[in-house]
Image (tube, rainbow, N blue to C red):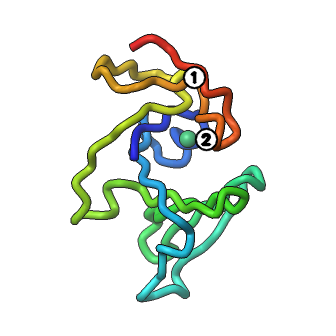
């Protein structure tokens, strides 16, 4: 889990930074009101899901990685302990917290793996 600063997340979340949690896609099951979950593919790399009843964002699937990003505030039982900042080159809200700041994404997720200073 960590913070993402990419332009796409900021526009989607309506916030300066997005708290993300990544899970295997198989770990997510919609238990109730699945008929209210709508999907939009902005880039083809991710599928955004939101609630048509309240308009709230729910999660984004990353099909190529078989991962799902469930927005941290939507898991009230989760103790949010960020470990990394990603897409920090796009930050509009710099944070000096000593955590690693990746320019984009880790290499294993298709990024450069390059780090930026705190
Ligand atoms: Zn992002």
Q: CB under 8 Å between callouts 1 and 2?
A: no
Which element is circle 2 on? helix
Q: Residue at x 45, y 77 (%)?
A: 53
In the image, 18 versus 23, the foreground residue is 23
Residue at the disc numbered 2: 8
Residue at the disc numbered 1: 103
Drawn side of residue 31 relative to residue 95, left or right: right
Q: Position of residue 24 (x, y in %)?
A: 53, 65
Which element is circle 1 on? loop
Q: Residue at x 39, y 47 (%)?
A: 1
**Badge 1: few (under 14), some or many (20 or more) residues near its Cα, within 10 Å?**
many
| N-term mark: 1 or 2 | 2
Q: Residue at x 52, y 67 (%)?
A: 50
Q: Is residue 67 above or below residue 118?
A: below
Q: Position of residue 78 (x, y in %)?
A: 25, 60
Drawn side of residue 61 relative to residue 76, left or right: right
Q: Is mark 1 within 8 Å of ligand 1?
A: no
Quarter holding ligand 1: top right
Q: Position of residue 68 (x, y in %)?
A: 54, 62
Q: Is residue 27 above or below residue 44?
A: below
Q: Is residue 93 above or below residue 105?
A: above
Drawn side of residue 94 relative to residue 42, left or right: left
**Badge 2: few (under 14), some or many (20 or more) residues near its Cα, within 10 Å?**
few
State which quarter of the image contains the C terminus. Answer: top left
- The single residue placed furthest to the right in the displayed view is 44
């Amino acid at each position: 889990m960590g913070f993402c600063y990419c332009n796409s997340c900021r526009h989607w979340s309506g916030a300066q930074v997005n708290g993300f949690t990544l899970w295997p896609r198989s770990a997510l099951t919609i238990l109730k009101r699945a008929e209210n979950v709508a999907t939009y593919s902005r880039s083809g790399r991710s599928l955004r899901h939101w609630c048509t009843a309240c308009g709230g964002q729910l999660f984004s699937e990353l099909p190529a990685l078989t991962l799902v990003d469930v927005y941290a505030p939507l898991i009230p039982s989760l103790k949010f302990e960020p470990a990394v900042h990603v897409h920090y080159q796009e930050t509009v809200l710099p944070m000096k917290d000593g955590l690693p700041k990746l320019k984009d994404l880790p290499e294993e997720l298709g990024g450069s793996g390059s780090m930026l200073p705190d």
